[in-house]
Image: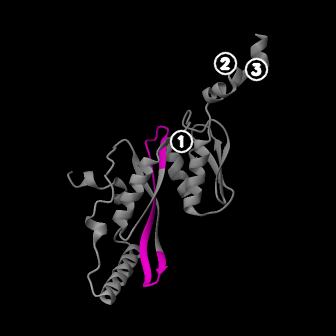
Amino acid sequence: MEESSHLPRALEQVDYSSEEVKKMAEEMKNDRNSKSSRDGRRSPRASRNAPVEKQVEDNEFEERIIEIRRVTKVVAGGKNLSFRVVAVVGNRDGKVGLGIGSAREVPTAIRKAVLEAKKNVTEVAVRNETVPHETIGRQDSAKIMLKPAGPGTGIIANSPVRAVVELAGVKNILTKSLGSSNTLNMARAALNGLVSLRSPQDFAKLRDVPLKAVFHGVNEEEGQ
């Protein structure tokens, strides 16, 4: 129990026994060793022991990893290898956030991504387990259409979009990707779409009219 309080729950989603993760870790280890021998000094191990940032403890949020990828940066001395992680957190009740973390080791990158996602948590308008109206979220060349759906429909979406809308609390929705299939951009586009949603109360306040006028029209309300 003591150990789990210091690690994000998202770490449990990573299959460290998979050949892909093993291969990436081995390549990074060999690269650090070769670079260390060229420089004539030990390779630093700061990513394991150094405090990255103060850990945010909040059991309210569920965590989900939607992407882990290796990033190579070419520098004068050779190549710097690291991992980039994209994480989504949410309370399944109208709060959701997305974060990105980079580090030379997967667990550290996951911790950074989860911490960043919790800092970026925002409230979105979810009504009756779906979205109140149709909208399109955009991020660079990615476009995600979000449409309300009735009970029992479920979440019709690809993996990154599903993670965002599900952790926001949506249980019934129709979505469609209209642009790029980049995982990060699709997740951001879905989040931007959710943020752009407005409830009937928001529309009434924006137009400075009674709530009934939003549903029945201003003219009908005035006639009564």
Tell me which amino acid carries mark 2.
Pro
Find the distance from the CA under tag 2 to the CA under tag 3.
9 Å
Residue 156 visible in rendering: no
Residue span colored magenta: 72-97
As measured in the structure, the alpha-carbon distance from the residue carrying label 1 to the one carrying label 2 is 27 Å
Secondary structure category for the residue under label 3: helix
The image position of residue 52, as x and y in percent, is 33, 60
Q: Residue at x 35, y 80 (%)?
A: 26
User: Which SS class for mark 1?
Assistant: loop
For badge 3, the amino acid type reads Val
Contact between labelled residues 1 and 3, with CB atoms less than 8 Å apart: no
Per the image, the residue denoted by label 2 is 210
Label whose residue precedes the other's in the sequence (2 or 3): 2
On screen, residue 222 above or below 65: above
Q: Which residue is mark 3?
A: 218
Amino acid under disc 1:
Val
